[in-house]
Image: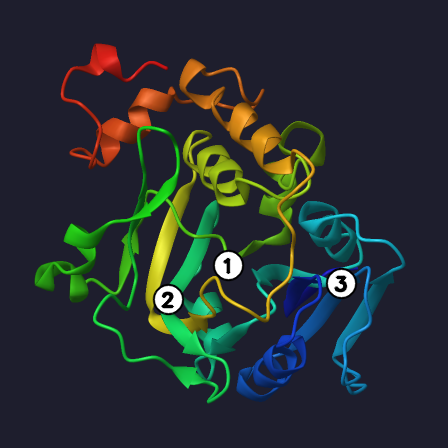
Amino acid sequence: MTNGDLVSIIIPSRNEKFLGKTIEDLLTKAVGEIEIIAVLDGYWPEPKIPDNDRLTLIHRGSPLGMRPAINSAVSIARGKYLMKCDAHCLFAPGFDQALKDDYEENCIVIPRRYALDPEKWQIIENPKYPIDYMYLSKDLHGEVWDEKNKDPMLKEKLIDETMSAQGSCWFMQKDYFHALELEDEVNYGSFSNEFQEIGLKCWLSGGRVVINKKTWYAHLHKTGGRGYSLGGGQIEKGVAYTHRWPTNTAWHKQTLPFTWLIERFWPVPGWPEDKAKWAP
């Protein structure tokens, strides 16, 4: 049975040094009802994660990968809402309520993102941040949209659309997750191009990807202390399938052509003005 106000927080975790601090932070900062479901993908964390009534741990004897981890957690999630986050994140106080307060149906919401200093467990002061806007490049990589992030007019717009996102934290209703048939292990593999799958399914079936600047999280950049390996051909599989989107053959529920998304956010860095060159 779904709890109408509960946020189920999903954390896929593989050899993560800061999982315990992330869980503690979430439990401390949430103001509404939450449950945390962390998947220990082929390892036991040291030190041991303390027991908590709001925490469920799923342990895999052998690692299966990020998408299978997320799917296993979603399968037991009781909340109306899902929030997935990486296992190395710091959150704003009241993040859960802020995300619920401005949620609209058929949306995927991204909190404003900062960089995390994991040892001090605080935001790193860096002029590159905060990051609100990202776009899809011509080769369908998610890229930081510097021009938009530095635009003083956009800084005043606290809820806005974004073409893409990093994928380290997202929020949506659980029913919408299932409607979008997300975390497709068969076609994308176990890890790569997660937000390409999420964002393109959302946008091209009539939904919206939205940045909520009223709340934030800080994410550990690619460095030590974080864990999913990117081997075994998993990157290539996800990349190859993602490149079916411009041919409009990636998903049976797509209702809008890929070119519609480029036009909605036009001009998009790196995309040529000649639409004939948009095709792969």
Where, by quadrant of the figure, is residue 218 drawn? bottom left
Q: Is residue 104 visible?
A: no
What residue is rendered at 81% in x and 86% in y?
51
What residue is rendered at 27% in x and 54% in y?
160
Question: For the N terminus, which image quadrant?
Answer: bottom right
Residue density around tag 1, few if under 14, some if 14–19, many if 20 or more, within 10 Å = many
Give the amino acid at mark 3: Val
Give the Cα separation between the discs numbered 3 and 2.
Answer: 23 Å
For mark 1, give the secondary structure. loop
**Which residue is identified by label 3?**
39
Residue 211, numbered label: none
For mark 2, give the secondary structure. strand
Q: Is residue 30 left or right of residue 46?
A: left
Q: Is residue 198 visible?
A: yes
Residue density around tag 3, few if under 14, some if 14–19, many if 20 or more, within 10 Å = many
Give the amino acid at mark 1: Ser
Q: Are marks 3 and 2 in contact (CB under 8 Å)?
A: no
First in sequence: mark 3 vs mark 2: 3
Q: Are marks 2 and 1 in contact (CB under 8 Å)?
A: yes
**Which residue is identified by label 2?**
113
Residue density around tag 2, few if under 14, some if 14–19, many if 20 or more, within 10 Å = many
Residues 92 and 119: in front is 119
**Which residue is identified by label 1?**
168
Residue 238 picture location, percent across and down:
58, 32
Residue 256 picture location, percent across and down:
40, 22
Give the amino acid at mark 2: Arg
What residue is rendered at 80% in x and 84% in y?
48
- Is 91 above or below relative to 174? below
Question: As drawn, which residue projects farthest toward the top?
Answer: 276
Residues 193 and 204: in front is 193
Residue 31 picture location, percent across and down:
54, 84
Question: For the C terminus, which image quadrant?
Answer: top left
